[in-house]
Amino acid sequence: GLLLNNSVTEKELQKTIRKKVGDDFEFKIDNHLQYIPIIQLYAGGVAGLKTKNSWFNQTKYLIISNTLTRLFTYGLKQSIHKLRPSNKPHSFPSGHTSFAFTNATVLYCEYINSSPIMAYSGFGFASSTAILRIVNNKHWLSDVLTGAGLGILITKLVYHFEPLKN
């Protein structure tokens, strides 16, 4: 994401997408897709799928991961001042994408040892969120790649260090 930031490549990609879908295209489901991995996380537990942690620790890791992701994402947005493709402020990194990948990574960490299909499925919703942020003219490619990286990295660090506190 950092390598593509403000590059000719991402600007050309945005132009190509605008030509294909039109300047007025907007499909707002990306506002909701980012939360589906959370629903999956708890639905799997209700359905009896084995998870790595109890629902209490799942919730704790989810809250810590999302809080840290929010702090880093919005801290970067406020300090970088990159404009969105629509010329509105606070483009870099994508908040929707960082939260979608945070939630997907929590789902992944909880189910990877017992239900790989469930574990990976959240990344489908997170990727769809990221793609729609670009198609909806809300973000550049570098914004969503960096947002995805932040969400994954922060959540993996929380899962790595949080149990050490116990």
Image (tube, grey):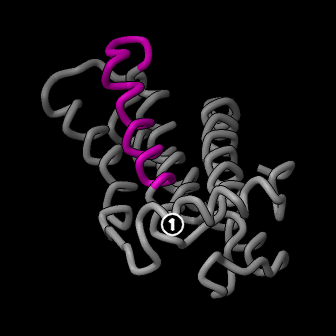
Residue at 34 percent across and 23 percent down: it is 51
Task: Identify the image quadrant of the C terminus.
Answer: top right
> In front here: 69 or 77?
77
Residue 113 magenta: yes
In this rendered view, identify the residue nearer to me: 39 or 136: 136
Label 1, secondary structure: give it.
helix
Q: Residue 118: percent from the left, percent from the top?
A: 31, 25
Per the image, the residue denoted by label 1 is 19
**Residue located farthest toward the bottom when viewing the structure as drawn:** 88
Q: Is residue 85 left or right of residue 44?
A: right
Residue 1, image x and y in percent? 76, 49
Extreme-left residue of the structure: 47
Give percent across and percent down for residue 135. Answer: 47, 62
Q: Which residue is the extreme one toward the front?
A: 19
Q: Few, some or many C-alpha atoms within 10 Å of disc 1 (few <14, some 14-19, many ≥20)?
A: few
Instruction: Give the amino acid at mark 1.
Output: Lys
Residues in magenta?
Answer: 112-131
Q: Residue at x 43, y 18 (%)?
A: 112
- Residue 155 shown in magenta: no
